[in-house]
Image (spheres, grey):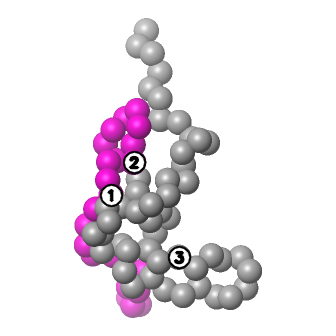
Amino acid sequence: MGQETNRFGSDPMILDTFDHTTPDFRVSADSPALTNAATPPDDGFFQAVSYIGGMGSEVDWTAGWTTSEQPAEP
């Protein structure tokens, strides 16, 4: 097996993934995912961020264009 450089073995401390109506996928301010982010290539496609993963602790980019509403019970 190759090196596991993209593996994260610690709890990323996601705020609230189990709320079925308003989940919060941001990480807590003391999350280990907020450290050791790699520097992406400077090619205009990637954006440099200070966290590992799809979401940091401040901005919920899913707000306003996604929904977690549950369908009404029949």
Q: Which residues are magenta?
A: 1-24
Above/below status of 3 relative to 11: below
Q: Tell me which label, 2 or 3, sits earlier in the chain.
A: 2
- The answer for how far apart the CA atoms under marks 3 and 1 are is 17 Å
What numbered label is drawn on residue 14? 1
Task: State left or right for residue 68 relative to residue 13.
Answer: right
Residue identifier under label 2 = 24
Task: State left or right for residue 58 relative to residue 29.
Answer: right
Amino acid type shown at disc 3: Val
- The answer for how far apart the CA atoms under marks 2 and 1 are is 8 Å
| Quarter the N terminus occupies | bottom left
Task: Assess whether mark 3 and mark 2 are in contact (beta carbons under 8 angstroms).
Answer: no
State the image quarter where residue 58 is shown. Answer: bottom left
User: Which structural element holds mark 3?
Assistant: loop
Above/below status of 74 relative to 69: above
Number of callouts? 3
Taking the spot 46% from the left edge, 69% from the top edge, the residue there is: 53
User: Which structural element holds mark 2?
Assistant: strand
Residue identifier under label 3 = 49
Residue 12, image x, y percentages: 31, 66
